[in-house]
Amino acid sequence: MPTDTSADKTAIFTRRESEARSYCRGMPAIFTRAQGSEMFDADGNRYIDFLAGCSSLNYGHNDPDMKAALVEHIQNDGIGHALDMHTEPKAAFLEAFERIILKPRNMDYKVMMTGPTGTNAVESAMKLARKITGRKNIIAFTNGFHGMTMGALAATGNLGKRGGSGMSALDGVTHMPFEGAFGESVDSLSLIEQMLDNPSSGVDAPAAFLIEPVQGEGGLNAASPEFMQGIARIAKKHGALFIVDDIQAGCGRTGTFFSFEEMGIEPDLVPMAKSFGGMGLPFAALLIKPEHDIWKPAEHNGTFRGNTHAFITARIALEKFWADDAFQKELAEKSVMLTTALQQIAEMVPGATLKGRGLMQGVDVGSGTLAGDICARAFEKGLVIETSGAHDEVVKILAPLTTTPALFREGFDILMEATREAMTNTKMAAE
């Protein structure tokens, strides 16, 4: 169990860092190093990481092969920043992405280097859809999260995050119900189609539909293949582009490289980020069907279009984990392990349900207070884990995909103990 003997060391953060900081408030340790699925703080305490930088570290902390390649590149005075000029690291990444990811899946996309964050990839997708169609309206979904810049935030449902904008200029988006958002009795696809087919519904013709196959921040709501196929069909019917946001659910998080590749759909645009860079280095891109790549030079610009250091680690990630199907088979086995463990935890909480798919799963415990208590107790015992959902009611597991079965079991044991204690506390408070 972690100990804290250095609370005064956090004073600088309180004194100088903005009030916008968030994760550190519930996990106030000062972390100093990390390897694989383990993190260590300044007091020598060890933590198992079930958050992985919100799925930015799918391959774990400091993968030795990525680290060695990056260090070699830097020591040899390799290019560190090149705007969008041609570089050997960029060419090597694009060739690996084409050979290992796109061609085996019969996918043909141009790769647009955007600014380094996921929200920039979403912004570029929304801009391009509007440019192509000449329309303004983007249809997004309840509980969706797409980023914190103004366009992506307009497509985000969370009231707290939207409130940070002062609620100004969050327009140009119509929010429709995600699958199951209003209960099993409401057919979201039928409702959406009726709204768009009715010329008096007040919904403008859409430029695009923007959807996450699994809503990470929204509570691990997982869309079925049928729902995704239905949205793709409606988009095509109404002359809109189909944007699949794979920023958090991609790069193996749901069991395949793309979260949608077994759904029988073909998105027009695919924003990518988070683990796209391999080892946590900022790197975002937009995959564009060639016929939609109508940008003029520098029409979507930015000083940091592509991260040259991330090209190195991203390429190693592809070559190491995706050159054959061995890693994907491991993910299938770990997914079953995760589901089994979470079912045991769900059985401890009356009415709790499992959410998500692949290695992007969690337990809806029905209360943000209870979920927060579980995660806080887990952190005290050495497990980094967070909540999600409209009311923070889901205990969410986003462990590195490379986490060993032994570490998974150790983390699950901590989570079980934390849940048991939280439930006992809840029962005592009720009595």
Image (tube, grey):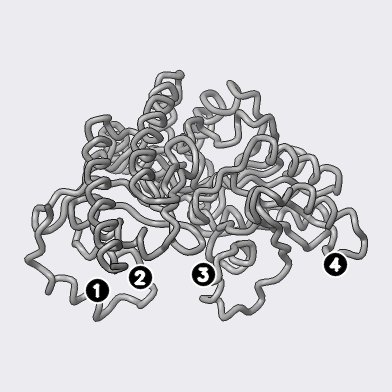
Residue topped by disc 4: 202
Task: Point out residue 86 in the picture as x, y percentages from the top left corner.
Answer: 53, 41
Q: Position of residue 158 (x, y in %)?
A: 55, 66
Element under disc 2: loop
Using the image, tell me which numbered label, if any, was put on residue 21. 2
The disc, 2 or 1, on the residue closer to the chain's N-terminal end is: 1
Residue 249 circle label: none
SS state under label 1 = helix
| Cα distance between the residues tagged 3 and 4 | 26 Å
Foreground mark, 3 or 4, reads 4
The amino acid sitting under disc 2 is Arg
Q: Are marks 2 and 1 in contact (CB under 8 Å)?
A: yes
Frontmost residue, 305 versus 97: 97
State which mark lies toward you, 4 or 2.
Answer: 4
Rounded to the nearest whole Å, what is the CA distance between mark 1 and mark 3? 22 Å
Q: Residue furthest right?
A: 199
Q: Which residue is mark 1?
A: 13
Do the numbered discs 1 and 3 sit on residues whose CB atoms are within 8 Å?
no
Q: CA distance from mark 4 to mark 1?
A: 48 Å
Q: Residue at x 71, y 41 (%)?
A: 268
Seen from the viewer's position, the closer of residues 108 and 95 is 108
> Counting other residues with Cα less than 10 Å from the Cα at mark 4, is it few (<14), some (14-19), or many (20 or more)?
few
Q: Residue at x 53, y 52 (%)?
A: 305
Q: In the rendered structure, which disc, 1 or 3, sits on the residue that comes first in sequence?
A: 1
Residue neighbourhood size for the residue with mark 3, other residues' Cα within 10 Å, grouped as few (<14), some (14–19), many (≥20): some
Looking at the rendered image, the disc whose residue lies closer to the viewer, 3 or 2, is 3
Judged left or right of residue 51, residue 417 is left
Between marks 1 and 3 in the image, the one whose residue lies nearer the viewer: 3
Mark 4 belongs to which amino acid?
Answer: Gly
Is disc 3 placed on a helix, strand or loop? helix
